[in-house]
Amino acid sequence: MVKISLGDWGRSIWRRMCDVYLLEDRFKELSWQTITCGLVYTGPVQNVQTWPKETKDLCRLLLEGRKGWIHIVRPLSEGKALVKLNVEGIPPTTSYFLRDAHILLGHAQFSTSVAVNVIPTV
């Protein structure tokens, strides 16, 4: 077991070592608050260069105040990463993948490409 300090939440948690992903040194050099993330194998429904405001609003609605697990699938350049995001549901004994929720609600689609070039990332 390892102890993880959640600096932005002001508390610590214990997790199994196999649940912990060690960040590359270049991530450790970044400001600790955020790493820009994109959802792996996820693309917009239309052919656009920027995610629609409605999709970004839905993302905020589904995530705000929720706990979850981020699985970094692939680091990208400049401190960005492609991730799978598993979000705690209601009740807390359930969970869902953010990508699947966006697809079910018609705001995204599955992509055969690991990364889709749409900014800003969801």
Image (spheres, rainbow, N blue to C red):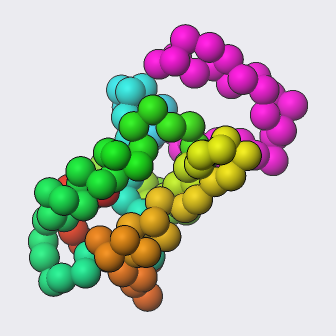
User: Where, by quadrant of the figure, is residue 30 drawn?
Assistant: top left
Q: Is residue 45 left or right of residue 68?
A: left
Question: Which portion, as a residue range, is magenta?
Answer: 1-25
Q: What quarter of the picture does the C terminus occupy?
A: bottom left
- Residue at left offset 45%, top offset 66%: 101
The question of residue 10 being in magenta is answered with yes
- Residue at left offset 56%, top offset 37%: 67
Q: Up-down: is 117 above or below 89?
A: below
Q: Is residue 58 left or right of residue 98?
A: left
Report whether residue 13 is seen: yes
User: Where, by quadrant of the figure, is residue 96 drawn?
Assistant: bottom right
Q: Is residue 2 left or right of residue 117?
A: right
- Farthest bottom residue in view: 112
- Farthest right residue in view: 1
- Residue at left offset 43%, top offset 88%: 112
The question of residue 32 being in magenta is answered with no
- Residue at left offset 47%, top offset 60%: 98
Q: Up-down: is 88 above or below 13?
A: below
Residue 12 is situated, as x and y percent measured from the top left of the image, at 67, 17
